[in-house]
Image (cartoon, rainbow, N blue to C red):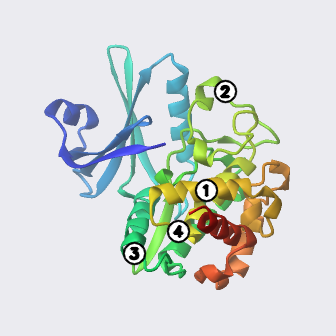
Amino acid sequence: MSIVKANNIRCSNKLAYVASASDHFTDIQLIAKGGFGVIYGGVHKLDGNRYAIKHMRSKATSSLFQMQVAEIRMLSRIYHPNIVRYHNSWVDERHGTMNLFMQMEFITQTLESYLVERYDRNRDEHIDGHIDGHIDGHALDIAFGLVEAVHFLHVHMKPALIHGDITPSNVMLQYAQERCIAKLCDFGLASVASSAVEFSGASSQHGTITYQAPEYHATKTPSVDVYSVGIVLFQLFCTFSSAMERYARIRAFKALQSTTSTLLDQTILEDHTQRPTIGELRQYMTQHAVRMHDTTQQSQSYRAIDYATSMAS
């Protein structure tokens, strides 16, 4: 889901009062807003730490409220270094409207902003139509962190969980000791895994089309997450100099079904039964970590996309 950043904008007194319904927060600031609700940052009066406060509104009898409660119950069971941490939640009911708040780990940078900054930097360093093919260490940190998060949901959670909306906007980035830690967030479309789960009408209207598997609106299995992860990894392991080039190459990557040769390529196969599991992808990436440092070692599909793009230009 896309978000609109609004950093350093102070809330009005009314918003501050609602967002601090528990009377435990101060210095409340608007961080982001979008279809998912509004996110504030606030300092806890007792422990002095800053937290993200996600504010969602709905009617008490609505299916949306039930989905929001389900998200909270799901997050309360999850603890992993590559998943944004849930701390607390509360409800403030006003005139029949349920104001639901989630207190989360405070992180502001998204993978989406990282990718935009990177292709801006690539454009500035562009020389004679070529871009340096070296993949920076942060890209590898992010890739492995995302795969570890999804592996935890699919393999270690009992029952297994499907995230259902893996996009660069739903991957937060935290820097520590020259490393970049990827943390998956926004579990509003998450569900328990089974052999095939039908989407409800309420959830099928959400999600981000670029990252949706072909079967997204029909069935929901762990392979929909693998497909989304594949599209994200493609962007991390390839270089772009503009948003137009980025999405043109994503479309080309999706179209190259017949040329797939590696597990990275197979993550986006239209036949979801032929895609690797997240465990197989995790093992493949571990075995090929050194090769991933250089895009000259890209898979067959990645090289074919470079060729097709250059021929079209």
Question: Regarding mark 4 in the picture, which secondary structure is present there?
Answer: helix
Alpha-carbon span between mark 4 and mark 2: 31 Å
Q: Amino acid at mark 2?
A: Ser
Asked if marks 1 and 4 touch (Cβ < 8 Å), the reply is no
Residue 176: assigned label: 3
Q: Which residue is mark 2?
A: 200
Tell me the CA gap for discs 3 and 1.
30 Å
- Whichever of labels 3 and 1 marks the residue nearer the N terminus, that label is 3
Of 278 and 55, the residue lying toward us: 278
Of label 3 and label 4, which has the lower sequence position?
Answer: 4
Distance from the alpha carbon under mark 1 to that under mark 4:
19 Å
Alpha carbon distance from label 3 to label 4: 13 Å
Q: Nearer the viewer, mark 3 or mark 4?
A: 4
Q: Is residue 21 visible?
A: no
Q: Nearer the viewer, mark 2 or mark 1?
A: 1
Does 141 sit left or right of 38 as displayed?
Answer: right
Give the CA distance from mark 2 to mark 1: 28 Å
Q: Are marks 4 and 2 in contact (CB under 8 Å)?
A: no
- C-beta proximity under 8 Å, tags 3 and 4: no
| Residue type (three-letter) at the residue carrying disc 4 | Ile
Residue visible at 74% across and 50% down in the picture: 223
What is the number of the mark on residue 54?
A: none
Residue at 52% x, 25% y: name it.
Answer: 64
Name the disc covering residue 142, or none: 4
Q: Amino acid at mark 1?
A: Ile
**Label 1 or label 4, whichever comes before in sequence order:** 4
Indicate the secondary structure of the residue bearing disc 2.
loop
Residue under label 1: 250
